[in-house]
Image: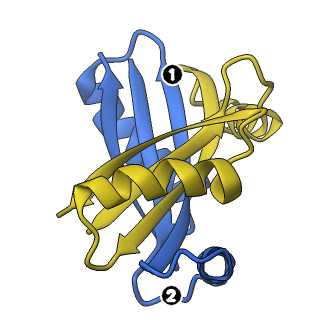
Chain colours: A blue, B yellow
Amino acid sequence: MKVRILVSFKDSVLDPQGQTVKNALHTLGYRAIKDVRQGKVFEIDLAGATKADAEKIIPEISDKVLANPIIEKFTWQIIEA
Amino acid sequence: MKVRILVSFKDSVLDPQGQTVKNALHTLGYRAIKDVRQGKVFEIDLAGATKADAEKIIPEISDKVLANPIIEKFTWQIIEA
């Protein structure tokens, strides 16, 4: 089973990396871009795991390792059964 | 319109960051995890853009700014009309 986890800053947290990308795009003339938020994506191969296993493991590892729950949020989905 | 762009290494490119995360998870006892690939995610707010605009702009900025097309690939989708 393959799982995709998206980790991004909470909305209340400033994202200087995203701001820098936005500024670079404006400099290149892409004025339609009003905001950029950058985050991380993890694609994890869980061999032989069931959906119930994933529902236990993924939030655990996201909180412990992949994201900093004080400033980041995560969402996840199964992308391959 | 909000667009999400996922940027990750091509399958043929080694991902040392993902390997490090995998090793950390193994150390914590998560043995079911067979592979981890890490990438970047961008959420971009395109004010007043149509789907056609996005189809022109997003591949352009992905190739020029967000991803390195030599070693990275990207996929994108509209997440909010």
Label 1 marks a residue whose chain is A
Q: Residue furthest top?
A: A48
| Residue displayed at 37% across by 74% down | B45
| Residue displayed at 52% across by 20% down | B32
Q: Is residue A40 visible?
A: no
* Disc assigned to residue A45: 1
Query: As displayed, is residue A61 above or below residue B65?
Result: above
* Disc assigned to residue A25: none
Going by the numbered disc 2, the residue's amino acid type is Val
- Asked which quadrant contains residue A53, the reply is top left
**Front residue (pair A28, A14):** A28
Query: As displayed, is residue A53 above or below residue A61?
Result: above
Task: Report x, y in % for residue B60.
Answer: 56, 52
In which quadrant is the N terminus of chain A drawn? top left
Label 2 marks a residue whose chain is A
- Asked which quadrant contains residue B22, the reply is top right
Q: Is residue A54 left or right of residue B44?
A: left
Among numbered discs 2 and 1, the one appearing first in the sequence: 2
| Residue displayed at 76% across by 31% down | B19
| Residue displayed at 49% across by 66% down | A8
Going by the numbered disc 1, the residue's amino acid type is Asp
In which quadrant is the C terminus of chain A drawn? top left
- Asked which quadrant contains residue B14, the reply is top right
Q: What SS does tag 1 mark?
A: strand
Q: Which residue is mark 2?
A: A13
| Separation (CA) of disc 2 from disc 1 | 30 Å
